[in-house]
């Protein structure tokens, strides 16, 4: 479970880096930056939904905040 969440987080970071690369390279002449950022938002929403579902199903447990 932790591996899947870590891989999804790395995919989100890679998509953000790809968007930055396209932003610097294309200078706004194509939609590649927008598509990469759309993918990042979609991956973030999917990861959040999966974590909430996994918590609901009991696959993961929240520990709460302990100072």
Image (cartoon, helix red, strand yellow):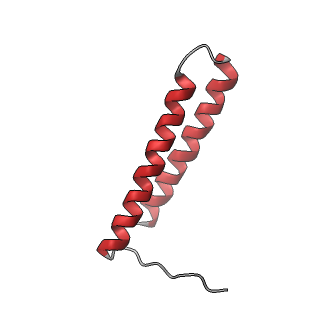
**Residue 53 relative to residue 41: left or right:** left
x 53%, y 82%: residue = 64
Q: Give coordinates of residue 39: x percent, y percent.
A: 47, 37
> Measured along the vertical axis of the image, is residue 42 above or below residue 9?
above
Q: Quadrant of residue 57?
A: bottom left
**Residue 1 relative to residue 28: left or right:** left
Q: Quadrant of residue 3?
A: bottom left
x 59%, y 32%: residue = 19
> Measured along the vertical axis of the image, is residue 12 above or below residue 21?
below
x 62%, y 37%: residue = 17
Which of the image's four quarters has the C terminus? bottom right
Single out the residue that lies furthest toward the left: 57
Q: Give coordinates of residue 47: x percent, y percent.
A: 43, 55
Q: Nearer the viewer, residue 50 or 18?
A: 50
**Residue 62 relative to residue 33: left or right:** left
Q: Give coordinates of residue 60: x percent, y percent.
A: 40, 74
């Amino acid at each position: 479970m932790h591996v899947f969440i870590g891989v999804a987080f790395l995919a989100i970071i890679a998509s953000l880096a790809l968007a930055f690369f396209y932003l610097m390279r294309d200078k706004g002449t194509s939609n590649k930056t927008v598509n990469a950022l759309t993918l990042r938002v979609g991956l973030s929403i999917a990861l959040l939904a999966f974590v909430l579902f996994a918590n609901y199903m009991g696959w993961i447990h929240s520990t709460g905040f302990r100072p």
